[in-house]
Image (cartoon, rainbow, N blue to C red):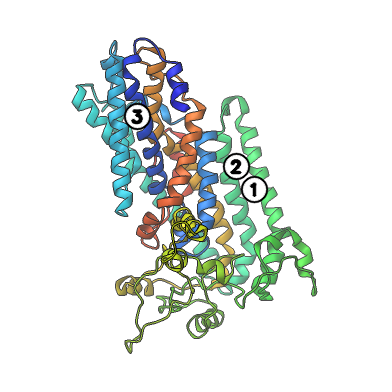
Amino acid sequence: MVLNTLLARQSSATAPYDWILAITFIAYFFSAFGNGANDVANAYATSVAARTLSMPQVGFLSMLTEFLGAVVLGARVTSTIKNGIIDIDRFEGRPGVLMLAMGCAEVGSAAWLMFATGQGMPVSTTQTIVGALVGVGFATQAAVTWEWTGGSVSQVAASWAIAPAIAACFSALYFGVLKYSVLERKDSFKWGMRLIPVYFGFTSAILALFITIEAPGSDLDALGAGTAVGIILGVFAGMTLICYIFFVPFFERKLIRKDTRLRVWHIPLGPLLRKENVHLYFPGKGTEYVTNYYADSYGRVAAGGKATHNATELEYDHERATDEPAVTGKTLGETDKDVGAMSDSPSPSTSGAGTPLANKTGYVAPYQRWIVPVKEMSWFNPKKLWNWTKFLLLRGVTIDAISHDSDLLRAIHSRANRYDVRVEHLWTYCQVLSAMLMSIAHGSNDIANAVGPIAAVYATYNSGEVNTRSPTPVWLLVIGGFLLGLGFWFMGYHIIRALGNKITQMSLLAALLSSSVLLPPS
């Protein structure tokens, strides 16, 4: 139906090139899918690795945030990809050649992204499409825009070095402030409780700044710097107040009173949680009031490189992680059964005596959970068809993407500093908010990598002449935003496994600043 709509708008000059449009459109599907499968992990990998979010939760969140970023904020960077890399004037009077060139770039980008993702190789989708367009420029003898102009190859390439540098600086600055204002202070949990509302407000203010700058139709000159600053400060003050009213009582009951029934949906109770006998709707089950973020899948906690100022509390959690079967790495709201759905299990580790260690999360791999019980059944059995459907649709978000059985990685982790797990827990909510902001930034920025070539092909096909200046159709962004989330849902675990605890998460401000100057950051 989509192709019929496209063909109905064709120009007689480009009528012979229907097949190019069709192939490019198919390649666009795979390019956007591969983009989501590979690049969305940049935003959510550390949240999964830290057990702040589970894979199913990230799957749903990524569908939402990538779609919002692509559709609401995604048109601005698209022009860099379709106009700024090679000299379009080379194709003047030859619309078919331009369509073929852009189609080849889309196919090449899609093929590499799908291959790299399947191999678990984190790659830059921006480098992929820019490289494809440069290759097309060489093949067609079109001039590649090397000079330092807006959206040129040199500026995009410079961003590959500038963005990590900016990210490193802001991440180091942010963590340094957090380290010396909370983590390294005596009674760090007390200081964490005092300052967490400020960090909530700061994170929300950054989100407000991003939306103010990137929202469609936003004009900072017309809005005025004073109004923009007022919006940001208002969000900061409002979120700080909300945190004091609702989140602080929640943290007090959960982390000081150690109420194991408390879940994230109890936050709206706010001050009522300070009462001794408060009624909790839908109370949670379990014996752990906080996740031990330092325990691996086998319940072991490697010795830290630096003692915490709250050693007693941390040692208590470490003992529970090693001596009791309760530590599951669950996020708020999950039950043991939920976590049990996760995943393709790694090889079992062994203790010093050579005895295999049981994985304390109790998960069951998707294949063992859904396929093995119905393996001998007839294909006409509805239960077998239903189990296979669940396996195909849910495997990508129920695979265990964080467990490892590497002595080297455990040795590296053992050198990391250890802090009070209660303090760590305070920042899980900010981490979720920041991960969502990063995902929105990715959707708004990197959708251009997939939609740029097809937008040029589509505009040229409709007009019958070389045309890359037309606005990107919203329906292309809608399809791309959906495919970004879908790609992560089915194949994102490959990159989550590769990233996990191995690299530092990119700063929000790096993505924000890169997007603001129309430079793709990844």
Between 455 and 156, the residue placed more toward the observer is: 455
Q: How far is disc 1 from disc 2 in space, using C-alphas? A: 9 Å
The C terminus: image quadrant? top left
How many marks are shown on the rendered structure?
Answer: 3
Which amino acid type is shown beneath numbered disc 3?
A: Thr
In primary-sequence order, the first of circles 3 and 1 is 3
Residue carrying label 2: 208
Task: Report, in whole angstroms, how far the alpha carbon at label 3 lies from the one at label 1.
Answer: 45 Å
How dense is the environment of label 3, judged by Cα within 10 Å: few (below 14), some, or many (20 and up)? Answer: many
Q: Is residue 359 left or right of residue 114?
A: right
Q: Residue at (19%, 26%) from the top-left corner?
A: 139
Callout 1: SS: helix
Query: Local crowd at mark 1 within 10 Å, few (<14), some, or many (≥20)?
Result: many
Mark 2 packing: few (<14 Cα in 10 Å), some, or many (20+)?
some
Q: Is residue 157 above or below residue 266?
A: above
Q: Who's the residue at 37% across and 60% down the image?
A: 497
Q: Residue furthest bottom?
A: 353
The answer to whether any part of residue 369 appears in the image is yes
Q: Which residue is tagged 3?
A: 24
**Residue that numbered label 1 is attached to:** 236
Q: Write down the quadrant of residue 14 in the picture.
A: top left
Residue 303's image quarter? bottom left
